[in-house]
Amino acid sequence: MKLLENGESETHLSITEEQIKQCHAQMMQVFLFRAELALRNSQHATAMDFANKAKELVFKEQLKADSLCTASYNFGLECYQKELYNYSKEWLKQSIEIGKETPTVKSEQQASSRQLLALVYVELKGDDNYANALNVIEQSILEQPEVKSIHLKIKIKLLLNHDDQSVLSAFRDLSMHPQLELSLALQTVTLFSQNQRTELCLKALEILDRKYQQVHENIQVQLKRLELLLSSRKFEEAKDVIRGELIRANNHGKIFNKSSLKQLHLLLWEQANIAFENKEYDNCLYWYDCSLQFMNHCTDDKLNISKLQRNRALCFMEQKQYEKALEITLEADEKDKSSPQTLFLLHKIYVLMNDNDKAIEAIKRLSHISDHNQKETVHGLICLAAQLSFQRGNRDVAGSILKILVNSYPTENIGNKELLVPLRCLARLKFAFLTKEIEN
């Protein structure tokens, strides 16, 4: 401190260049904090003004720009998540621009900014935005050829309606990436299918067929091919895939994982259901028979095998092949002795074959199912059996079923309104029998 002639004092402060630089760095952080605060309050123009002040300070004073680059990316991400795509675009473009001029910003960070910017352009929609998205993602791939970037490039090409050759070229790049997972590859094929690019799908699957040679992976490729062929109604080619790839692998003891097996059965049963609805019973049996070949290796899947056999039996019943239907339903009964549906189907077949005793025996077994969760199902099926016998004019069977129904109610339920229905029906039936005897 120095004393001046007029009695006042003067203080001299010594500030180093490093201290000034630290001060500017702190000012930059303040600007970014205020930008973040403005953004949270939806004051987007104010937020950008503070970010620009921070940017001017960075380049004027040659400060490290990494934090500014990261902050701009984070602001862009926040706007993207809030679906404020135009604001997100501006923040991300700024992040990329700062990254270009900052050697310490890693290429991975630049690639992430470009990936997100490409997604923003996709969300903004329109050919011009899609073209911008493609340009941005291609730059990202040059910097950092990540799997998700190539996948996004393919998606954008589809949005721009590029021809199959152009899209397939990008798919080849994807297939050669060492970090590609089969699930993403198949997801990409699904994307082709959703865009009605059937031939492109098949060519892509050929590439995957060569890439994934291990059985458990190749099976998933073949399942995707089967799904595609079935949806395109190329049934003969689909059957070739089943016979040539899937059944052969199955017969050689290749184990399908549960997910693949479930997918296969869903595809086969869907086709069988369509054929049944169209009364194409031989075709329906073909799809169920294919499913059965795979199920025969699954000793722990008795319930589904039983259901499958019931479905096959229904086809033979429609073809009036009752002996064959009975044989198959008995196999289903062996797999699941307590299935109400199987016992009802047995009853129905015996009625059609005029074997009343066995028809009644099947209903007796049905009434003895003790599983409380199936109580309503059992009751409904017994009532339906009685109704069907009435409709066929088979009063003997109908009467026996009504007796079984009445006796299946616990004694404490006597007087229950629900019990009055079968009792009334049984009384009418007995009265009809007496009337007939009197007339005779």
Image (spheres, rainbow, N blue to C red):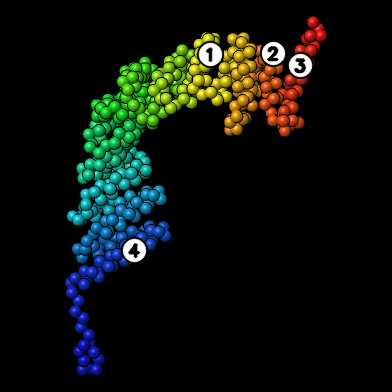
- Helix, strand or loop at mark 1: helix
Which residue is found at the position 21% from the left and 92% from the top?
A: 3
- Whether residue 251 is situated above or below residue 80 in the rendered picture: above
Which residue is found at the position 52% from the left and 17% from the top?
A: 329
Question: Is residue 317 left or right of 152 when viewed as pictured?
Answer: right
Residue 189: give x, y in percent of width and height.
33, 30
Mark 4 vs mark 1, CA separation in Å = 79 Å
Upstream in sequence: badge 2 or badge 1: 1
Kindly check if marks 4 and 1 are in contact, taking CB atoms under 8 A apart as contact: no
The crowding category of the residue bearing disc 4, from other C-alpha atoms within 10 Å (few below 14, some 14 to 19, many at least 20), is some
> Please, what is the three-letter code of the amino acid marked with disc 4?
Phe
Which of the 4 image quarters holds residue 183? top left
Would you name the residue on which mark 2 appears?
396
Residue 214: give x, y in percent of width and height.
27, 28
The crowding category of the residue bearing disc 3, from other C-alpha atoms within 10 Å (few below 14, some 14 to 19, many at least 20), is some
- Helix, strand or loop at mark 4: helix
Residue 33 circle label: 4
